[in-house]
Image (cartoon, rainbow, N blue to C red):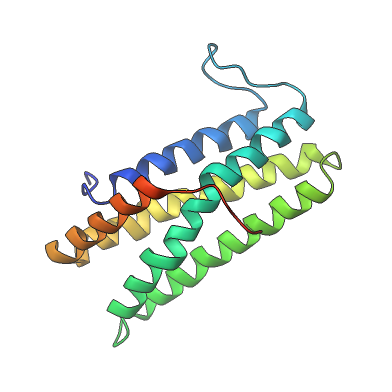
Amino acid sequence: MKRHPSLVPLSREHHDGLVMAQRLLHGRAVNPRVAWPSAAEEQVKRLLEFFQTELCPHFAFEEATLFPGLTARTRLGAVTWRVLIRDLIGDHRAMRRMIRELTNEPTTRLDERLPAFADRLGTHIRREERELFERMQAECSAAELAELGERVSAYSATRKAACVL
C-alpha cells in the first residue's frame, strides 16, 4: 500500500534506520561510495551518534504523540491496537537499554551486540511499517490522518537531538 502523505516523513526516518541496521549487521555499507568504518568500535560511535540524532527524537515523537493518539482513539475496543503499541514501546525500551550498555561498555562483545541491536531495530521498523502504518491507513479517517500530518510536520521542523536514555 502506498504510504499516506502524513506518514511519509516517519517512513523516511524508518528507511534511515534500516540502512543503519544493515550496516551493523554486515559490518559494512552496501553502497561502495559510503564511508563506513570496518572497526567495530568505530561502528559503535556511529551508532551512538545515530541514536542521539535520529532514533531518540523519533522514539520520543512516537511515544508522546503518535501512540497516545492511537490508544485514545481505540479506548472502547480494538485491544490489538493497545497490544501492538505496548510491544512497540517495549522495543523502544529494549533498544534504549542496549544503547546504555554500549555507552557503558563500548568494546565488549561487539560481534554479538551490534548485530543484536541491528536485528531489533530492523524488526521493529518493519513491524511499524507493515502493521502499524498499514492499519492506520486502513482504519483512521482522513481527518485523523490530516491532523497527524500536521503533528508530523511540526515534529520534523523542530526535531532536536536531546535525548535521555
* Residue 124 seen anywhere in this rendered image of the structure: no
Which residue appears farthest toward the left when viewing the image?
A: 142
- Depth check: give the residue in front, 146 or 33: 146
Tell me what residue is drawn at x 50 percent, y 57 percent.
Answer: 59
Q: Position of residue 39 (x, y in %)?
A: 77, 24
Q: Is residue 131 left or right of residue 57?
A: left
Write down the quadrant of residue 135 in the picture.
bottom left
Horizontal side of 162 relative to 114 (left or right) equals left
Look at 64% across and 60% down and name the residue there: 94
Q: With respect to residue 26, does 157 lie above or below?
A: below
Q: Nearer the viewer, residue 48 or 74?
A: 48
Residue 16 position (above or below residue 124): above
Left or right of 47 on screen, residue 73: left
Q: Residue at x 63, y 55 (%)?
A: 95
Q: Position of residue 63 (x, y in %)?
A: 46, 65
The image position of residue 109, as x and y in percent, is: 84, 42
- Decide: is 2 above or below 78: above
| Residue drawn at the location 58% of the way across and 39% of the way down | 50
